[in-house]
Image (cartoon, rainbow, N blue to C red):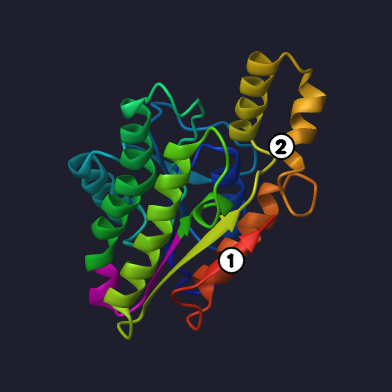
Amino acid sequence: MAHAPVVLITGGSGGLGLAVARRFQAAGHRVALLDHHDQAPVAPGLAAHHVRADVTDRKAVERAVAEVGERLGAPGVLVNGAGIAESGPLLPPDDAMLARALSVNVTGAWIASTAVLPAMLAAGRGAIVNVASTAALRAYKYVAAYVASKHALLGLTRALAEDVRGKGVTVNAVCPGFMDTPMTERTVQNIVRATGRDAAEARGTVAAMNASGRLVRPEEVADAIVALALDPRRHGEHVVLE
């Protein structure tokens, strides 16, 4: 693909991040993965530039964006995939859990988006896709902090979309249910520890929360992200996959 925009994916070493990277690479894009790990993820067949940064640290993210620009070119697509999902009872209140959820899931997307937007706006083209959740649309028990952060992320998506409307940059979100990823597996293990159920039963409980009754494959979400990013007619939307 000639002049395919460079793609920057935050949280790029996770199961969804790698699936998204593979989809964009297959479509002819140069890809950069941003995460907080020192080492690049082991992903056979994937040729992606790895940059280390904590998404909650603006200076670190801006340095990473500059590095990507020097190595590959200014990012023309940003996928905000970095996120955390912690669970626990509402009481006694865990203020630190809420702070972590908002910092990574919302502030991280805010920082990365505003780090890449100047170049996108100057070029008159670009795309941002935020990875929200069905928790941005409804509530679940034991994850109040996560639900609050994903509602905020969807609100941020809509606000950014209005701010850049008509300027050649699109902003959208995907809202997947529980996915077949390591993050969901950690949720399953939390259920096992809390309830004493076996892993298969706990996994079934999680899958049953999706409308389809199954865990969503990361590749399905990746396909939706690519479709949103590459279609300039899609703007201010959220796509639900469950």
Quadrant occupied by the N terminus: bottom right
**Which residue position is annotated with label 1?**
239
Q: Is residue 27 visible?
A: no
Q: Is residue 218 above or below residue 37?
A: below
**99 in the magenta segment:** no
Per the rendering, the mark at residue 206 is 2
Characterize the local packing of mark 1: few (<14), some (14-19) or many (20 or more) Cα atoms within 10 angstroms.
some
Marks 1 and 2 sit apart, C-alpha to C-alpha, by 20 Å
Secondary structure state at the residue bearing disc 1: strand
Q: Is residue 202 left or right of residue 23?
A: right
**Residue closest to the far left:** 59
Residue toward you, 158 or 26: 158
Which residues fall within the magenta stretch? 119-129
Secondary structure state at the residue bearing disc 2: helix
Residue drawn 77% across and 43% down? 208
Quadrant occupied by the C terminus: bottom right
Q: Is residue 222 above or below residue 99?
A: below
Residue drawn 23% across and 75% down? 122
Amino acid marked by disc 2? Val
Q: Is residue 98 visible?
A: yes
Q: Is residue 55 left or right of residue 137?
A: left
Of mark 1 and mark 2, the one earlier in the sequence is 2
Characterize the local packing of mark 2: few (<14), some (14-19) or many (20 or more) Cα atoms within 10 angstroms.
many
